[in-house]
Image: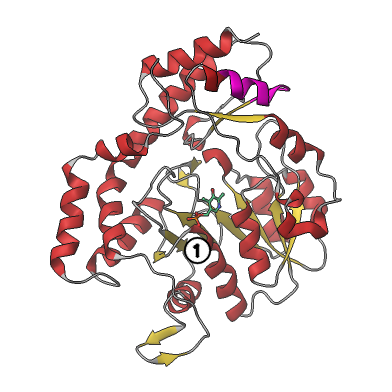
Amino acid sequence: MEQIKFLDLQKVNAAHGERIKRAAERVIDSGWYLQGGENASFEAEYADYIGTDHAIGCGNGLDALRLILRGYKELGRLKDGDEVIVPANTYIASILAITDNNLTPVLVEPDLQTLQIDSQRVGEAITERTRAVMIVHLYGRCAFNERIAALCSEHNLLLIEDNAQAHGCMFNGRRTGSLGNAAGHSFYPGKNLGALGDGGAVTTNDPELAAVVRALANYGSQKKYVFEYAGLNSRLDELQAAILREKLPLLDSENERRKELARKYIAGITNPKIRVPQTSDWSANVVHVFPIFSDERDRLQQYLAQNGVQTIIHYPIPPHKQHCYRQWNNLKFPITEQIHNQELSLPISPVMTDGQAERVINLLNSWI
Ligand SMILES: *Cc1c(COP(=O)(O)O)cnc(C)c1O
């Protein structure tokens, strides 16, 4: 029986063939490994792709978000203790970036249909101390909407996007990552645009923030050996930048293949014991993850594993139930908890075949 992996990274990168190897060779032979031409070119190309004035490469997605919040603190827009609204069902990195900056996360429940932060509840969560909203385009689905934008401008809040899972996703013809004040991106190998190691970027149209983030990521220095801020070392290395430059031009076609497979899943899965979220606007979903939901999620996962299909749960334990945030362990977020109890992510990637998707669908439909 052929095993169907959740994500076959070997095959994903092999599809780029010799281009990745030639890019790596170019860097190895150049003798220049940090803060060089590959990073500068990738920043320009990525800013152009996302549709922002600036992109700043950094070490990873968590750092991108940390740098944005720290940057706004240095600029006087945020201070210790300020509240930042964030979805309760996000990956923990979004929240770590907030607490790492001595800011206060205010967890808000998602909408069960869209799986994204519920804009009505965002409005209800705003207090005198709220200074920012961090939306997360979770599963590759756009979390931005006019309502959230209106709330942010009405209350003078920063709008920060966690775009780690949604490279290429759109809202009304604009890319996610260009919709708020600033966005954090991750190039972790398993993301839609993945490096062969860690990588990240900040995108923004705010020239002041861009300058501060660039300095903060380089020890707080704009001029060699002169330190304006107590910064950190978080850089995108030349090797990863060169590899990302080769992969970026193929991102849209890879996302299209993900969408084709997602459409097959949606049309094919008919088992009434499984809930499949619908998508009305395919430009607003780059299908980083294809989630399904079941009351008997764990039994379903076991059944698929026994039949050679690997799945993953995004995520088994919600942030408010984690030990690192034990002060929240008694809080109740029923929608978030339901998602964490029922969610199962099916295999999906640009290199998955129609035959593999059909096998997964047939298995799901014959599950009793
Ligand atoms: C992957 C991810 C991050 C963190 O990115 P890293 O590059 O792994 O640090 C942040 N937020 C979300 C939603 C993610 O999925």
x and y, in percent, of residue 105 in the image? 73, 61
Q: Name the residue under label 1.
A: 64
Q: Main secondary structure of the magenta part?
A: helix
Magenta residue span: 293-303
Residue 313 location, quadrant: top right
Magenta stretch contains residue 73: no
Does any atom of ligand 1 lie closer than 8 Å to the CB of label 1?
A: yes
Please tell me whether residue 231 is drawn above or below residue 28 in the rendered image. below
Q: Position of residue 181 (x, y in %)?
A: 55, 62
Kindly indicate the quadrant of the structure image that contains residue 350.
top left
Q: Nearer the viewer, residue 14 or 231?
A: 14
Q: Is residue 245 above or below residue 109?
A: below
Above or below: residue 181 compared with residue 351: below
Q: Residue at x 60, y 24 (%)?
A: 301
Above or below residue 340? Residue 155 is below
Quarter-wise, where is residue 70 in the image? bottom right
Residue 15 at x, y percent in the picture: 25, 35
Give the residue displayed 51% in from the left and 37% down from the top.
284
Residue closest to the eye, 249 or 345: 345
Q: In which quarter of the image is the N terminus?
A: top left
Q: Where is residue 79 in the image (x, y as percent from the top left)?
A: 69, 77
